[in-house]
Amino acid sequence: MEASLVTAVEGPATRLAFTGGLDAAATARLWPEATRQAQDAGVLTLDLTGLTGLDTAGAVLLLRLERLARETRWHGPPPGPLQAVLDRTRQALAAPPAAAAPSLPALAQLGQATVRRGQDLLSQIGFLGEAVVAGLGTIRRPWRLRLAEVLRHLDEAGLRAFGLTLLLGVLIGVILAFQSSIPMRRFGAQSFIPNLVGISLLRELGPLMAAVILAGRTGSAFAAELGTMTVNEEIDALRIMGIDPVAWLVLPRLLAAILVMPILALLMDLAGLIGMGLVMGSLGFPPVGVVNQLRSAIGLKDLMGGLFKAAVFGLSIGLVGCRAGLSAGRGPRAVGDAATAAVVGGIVSIVVLDGIFSILFFRLGW
Amino acid sequence: MAEEAVIRVENLAARFDGRTIFEHVSFEVRRGEVFVILGGSGSGKSTLLKHVIGLYPPAEGSIHILGEPMGGLDGAARTALLRRIGVMWQSGALFGSLTLAENVEVPLEEHTDLPAEARSLVAQAKLGLVGLADAAGRLPAEISGGMAKRAGIARAMALDPPILFLDEPSAGLDPITSAGLDALIRQLARDLGTTFVVVTHELQSILAIGDRCIMLDKQARGLIAEGDPRRLREESENPVVRAFFRREVLA
């Protein structure tokens, strides 16, 4: 039988009579009317003698009405299962709820966040130190390096990223050439497009774009893999077996990232120059002229500077990704958080490093 | 008059890639009882549970829950039946990004039109019932395994289902927490009149909570015993059953 509510108001007294089965559906239907009546009531009488069923949602409604009214008188329900449901729910709701964490003022929150960032940076530097120590240990005992693991990561981070790197490289070369051709045409300087694109690619965009690819593909994969291992207590298991997780897991990944980055950057450079060459061809410039312009504009110093930067970017992405994974929390969310931290932290770190390199190269006159 | 069967399994078989896990499995679960599915590791206990709740289609046989054929329903009828059962998974299977209270509110939000205040109060009541009122605002990653199992029970009970399935509720818990969970199951069965189907191989739990049980065996690929677990322990002539209950090594 569907539950119904009959309301009778006599002066300050309000009588709410429930009949039928008061389940979740009926509670949802009667909640607004019943709570409104209870709020207005001086003395509330809950007549439950006609109830034939009651679940937790129904009991919650009745107890809510009791709290809303200034004074409540109960009629029924008859002793038995319905009374038991009501008693049990009353008892469960009587348990003290969780105390809310005290909220800090905005300035204190800002301070707390700043301290956390500082600690995070210190921890990152500490992690770099751990990696250096592990690396020195491996130089002393090179047979300890897990070469198969290095090769696996070289394959995953490098070989499998070749297609994407080539595609993006060609597109960037095409875009740069087209975008620069419009203003340079005004000055009759279209023949210098190879100079502009060549220098931009070799010194800046090649390593930077390759690093973005590495951070997105490989940094996040490092974090997710190591994060899952942390969640599954595999890292703890390694420590208990007396194996340094940094030497065992981090070093092969770092080495792969450092080795693969210059190759990806070089590929990006070459693909970008090919893309630029295609645009120059479409603008009527012969390939020989483009090559001569490139030769006059760029030198080995530009290329090597870019590749050196790429190797440092690789180290940074590897460090950030591995640390994000190893410091993952518990639960499936932790792995996602670690992957996000790896990508965001990796990209921020390469941009910061790029800025430092720009100042350094400028000072050195490179 | 015979007690009403709320679950009826007839001639059920489970096969994966041509490999038979069990076959010719038939049993009934009566209203209000704590029914235990027991057996050794790899005997197919959890597989049987997943067949009964409709996650796996049976290779043979039929399953009726509350008179409805589990395999023959789809759409709204299936959803309506699923609302009337609750499942506590072995790991708790709590949603990691939601607090315990929000976890309990998920089925209420999906299957009822209760206002937010009512949902919150019901969640609080359910968590209070399993002794987690003070942990309502915590995330699953911040609680212990035993608490996660209790929160899993609270979520399974959110819609007051007449049947609750519990997969290995005591696994991985210390004896005190495990005994507390057993007491909670008995209390809920007594107070709510809920039918419990519990998959476990924890001997003490089986004897503490089970009204009746069935036992699966890997070698037999099916049922080898059915009845009151205390009587099976004392009277069964089956060597596997005897070894299981007496913790003996099989010859």
Image (cartoon, coloured by chain):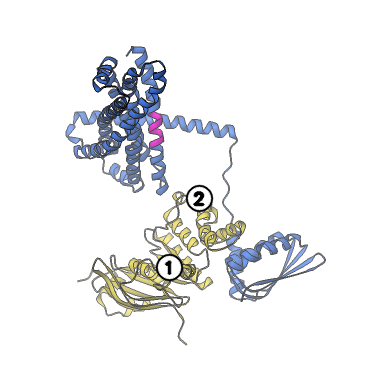
Chain colours: A blue, B yellow
Protein chain holding label 1:
B
Q: x, y (%) of residue A116?
A: 47, 33
Q: Compare residues A363 and B119 and report the one nearer the observer.
A: A363
Numbered disc 2: secondary structure: loop
Q: In the rendered structure, find residue B165 and report the number of the disc placed on it.
A: 1
* Residue matched to label 2: B138
Distance CA(mark 1)–CA(mark 2):
25 Å
Numbered disc 1: secondary structure: strand
Q: x, y (%) of residue A179?
A: 39, 26
Q: Which residues are magenta?
A: A343-349
Question: Does B168 sit left or right of A13 as displayed?
Answer: left
Asked whether A17 falls inside the magenta stretch, the response is no
Protein chain holding label 2:
B
Asked whether A344 falls inside the magenta stretch, the response is yes
Magenta: main secondary structure equals: helix
Residue appearing at x 58%, y 54% in the figure: A97
Asked which quadrant contains residue A177, the reply is: top left
Quarter in which the C terminus of chain A is drawn: top left
Give the residue type that dot 1 points to: Phe
